[in-house]
Amino acid sequence: MNRQRSEAAFAAAKRVIPGGVNSTVRAFRAVGGTPVFVREAHGAYLVDVDGNRYLDYVLSWGPMIAGHAHPAVVEALHRAAERGTSYGTPTEYETELADVIVEAVPSVDKVRFCSSGTEATANAIRLARGYTGREKFIKFEGCYHGSADPFLIAAGSSALTMGVPNSLGVPAATAQDTLIVPYNDAAAVRAAFEHNPGEIAAVIVEPYVGNMGMVLPLPGFLHALRTMTREYGALLIFDEVMTGFRVARGGVQAREGVLPDLTTLGKVIGGGLPVGAFGGRAEIMDRLTPDGQVFQAGTLSGNPLAMAAGLATLRLLGDDTFLQLERLGQRLVDGMAEVFTGRGVPHTVAAAGSMFGFFFADGPVTDLAGAKRSDTALYGRFFHAMLDRGFYFAPSQFEAAFLSLAHTEAEIDRTVEAADDALAALRPAQDDVVCR
């Protein structure tokens, strides 16, 4: 495909934007090459500035569950924008969307809106600390909760020690309060509680992980977290920014029957506009200002455009739509697994609701160490081979993929066929690597 205009656009962007992008993964560093600059998107497809068309499995990293430019969402935005784009005052939109969330998400009695998933998780941690009077919290290797300082922490020499910053600019003092343990390791969580008695405010987790690739919890893991947090007097926070209204109307907690104390949301609930939210039991949420003493505020929190787009999107999502998306996701990963097996490529696949993922690694992949066994070089070649065939996957092995209501069975089958063709074309290069 000719991508000369994308190359020129990237060169221009790098002159005025660090790295040429406004979110790191978009730079294609993990797969090589030049980012695709998109001109427009409709339904399940992106169109780049060179006029190339791609079947989209990134979907703005999850929000576009209705598909791009869905008529109902566009109309809702048009009507809202005609009345003004921001007021800095309460609106009925906020209450209406909050009502939908409270009705759908089993653990949420009250919800507070903000402008991003990062804001949601940072506020949830602050609220947990304010509620419990404790400062430390547990997070899991490979789970991403946004770019706030407390989350940019890597594991230390032991899962029982304090974390260490994995970004310049994060104070060591901040890292001291973040305890890192492997995902799916309930024993490590208990050990962390036992080594920090009375100090841990919360455990925060992506219940289905989408930020180290698609990794699902082992049977009983989420239930164990619920049991231990109650036992040790800590709060359990489900980061459902990605999975909320994605894997089921009520998120992972509805699928798994495990109710956290706090839930963070984003992506789908804004219909493609910047949004975040956190909610939970009323007694916890009432600790927020102005009623309580845990501060939270934001100029664009509850922005009327985001509320309108979110409402329009959520009205499209009934139980039947989630069943449809689940069937499509399973059809895709089953087809991809058959192709990978037929081509002799080590792999593991996973799917839940309208999320899916695959690793070029022998399974099972249950944690970050397992994900890191993936053949990222092969993924990079596969990514570009699929891109050249008109299919847009995440430019990183370590990201989940998504489906929308606009995807069809025919497009799923065409994707599987393209994957087979791509691997067939890549096979000589793979054989050459093996021979050397």
Image (cartoon, grey):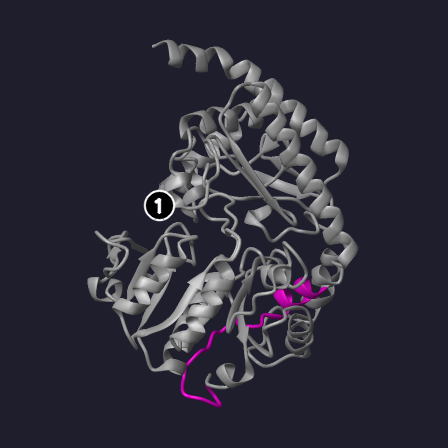
Query: Which x, y percent locates residue 2?
Result: 56, 22
Q: Which residues are magenta?
A: 289-311
In the rendered image, the residue lying farthest to the bottom is: 291
Vertical position of residue 354 compared to residue 270: above or below: above
Query: Which x, y percent locates residue 156?
Result: 23, 53
Check disc 1 and report the residue beneath it: 18
Q: Is residue 33 left or right of residue 401?
A: left
Q: How many marks?
A: 1
Residue 116 in view: no
Viewer-nearest residue: 311 or 18: 311
Viewer-nearest residue: 36 or 343: 343
Identity of the residue drawn at 45% across and 28% down: 380
Query: Which x, y percent locates residue 161?
Result: 23, 60
Decide whether the magenta segment is chiefly helix, strand or loop: loop
Viewer-nearest residue: 237 or 184: 184
Amino acid on which the number 1 mark rests in the picture: Pro
Q: Is residue 371 left or right of residue 93?
A: left
